[in-house]
Image (spheres, helix red, strand yellow):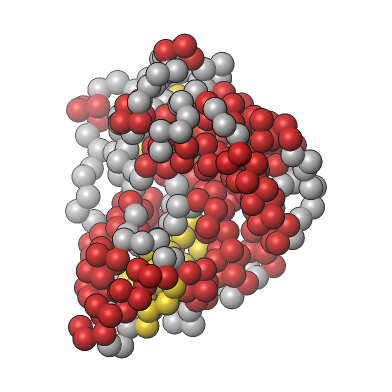
Amino acid sequence: MKKLSILGSTGSIGTQTLEVCRNIPGFEIEAITANSSIDVLEKQALEFKPKLVSVMNAEKADELKTRLRKAAPNIKVMSGMEGLIEAAVLKESGTIVVSVVGNIGIKPTYEAIKAGKEIALATKEVMVSGGSLITKEAEKHNVQILPIDSEHSAIFQSLQGNNMNKIRKIILTASGGPFRGRKKSELENVTVSQALKHPNWNMGAKITIDSASMMNKGLEVIEAKWLFNIDVNKIEVVVHPQSILHSAVEYEDGAVIGQMGVPDMKVPISYALTYPNRIKNNFEKLDLFKIGTLTFEKPDIDTFECLSLAYEAIKKGGTMPAVLNAANEIAVAKFLNGNCRFTDIPVIIRETMAAYTVKDKYTIDELLEADKWGRDFASKINM
Ligand code: MG
């Protein structure tokens, strides 16, 4: 029996993780957390009977506590960062699924690693911002970080049995998002609802906007660098609109090993939870005859500047990726709230990065400081 804490159980990955746990036997849910969606969290709590439930928003946590008092008096209800960290280090849990939105995941992931917990990581921002610190700490505590991000799961799967072989390059596939093929001038007036229409994947709002700007792929380049300890120059982004080849590894002999499947996050979630085993499920299977054609293109980095900004940030290194990520989170929130145009997102990030003095080596507190600096600076940019 594998015992799990799910940080961010009401979001897209969180609910799909619970779906996997309903579908595959052998999991017990010890803790679940949410930002503020207490209706969904309450239902999950009554179904999975965890020991701990936590809500970021303190008022909502109080309301949930009142609701659960009669129906499930044994479930402890906590709130804020304290509750999130408690779920991350909970004595009973062996594996922590990190699927919160954005940088809020850094501290609890760091604490979970220090407590020796296995990490199933969906929140790429944790690796983007704190990659060097997180991987160093994971090595120190002999903690395995299993990727849930579909591309990184594909790379991880393609590396199995090849640990000793030299990698020539990683082929990181990208769908290209809803605006693939458009030029910059055609993106100036796109609306939030247009940007939220992803062709292949059904995901949360933040990551869907990141996919439309291709920042998602930029963040994934940085995530891959840290997860697989590889030079970013050896990571090649390839636009593959069908999202069937989820990524691949090319070895020195020219052999390319990749992982294919329908675009369904439940597959990488299952692999992270059952690794190294593969367990039968009832999810949709790939029908190559139905797909027919797979195509590949070069990314348009003039239009999708966010991708180059991410390469720039990781090449600067130190705390710069944390600032890139923080500025992006703010810029995306501004766009979603109607406070800037879609094409302003890279402008806000570029200005924030240009104003920042990078710290090469950093502690967890310095990392969180850099994140805060990026957020504050980006918030003040008026478009
Ligand atoms: Mg991905």
Q: Would you place residue 374 above or below residue 178 in this image?
A: below
Residue 331 placement (x, y as % from top left):
52, 36
Q: Is residue 41 left or right of residue 143?
A: left
Q: Nearer the viewer, residue 291 or 86?
A: 86
Look at 49% across and 45% down and name the residue there. 152
Classify the position of the C terminus by image quarter: top right
Is residue 229 visible in the rendered structure shown here?
Answer: no
Classify the position of the N terminus by image quarter: bottom left
Residue 353 placement (x, y as % from top left):
69, 35
Look at 58% across and 73% down and name the residue there. 116
* Image quarter of residue 253: top right
Q: Is residue 34 left or right of residue 238?
A: left
Look at 46% across and 41% down and name the residue there. 333
Q: Nearer the viewer, residue 198 or 161?
A: 198
Q: Would you place residue 77 above or below residue 199 in this image?
A: below
Is residue 39 visible in the rendered structure shown here?
Answer: yes
Q: Would you place residue 111 above or below residue 165 in this image?
A: below
Report the label total. Answer: 0
Residue 209 placement (x, y as % from top left):
42, 35
Residue 39 placement (x, y as % from top left):
24, 65
Look at 38% across and 22% down and name the residue there. 190
* Image quarter of residue 78: bottom left
Q: Nearer the viewer, residue 227 or 369?
A: 369
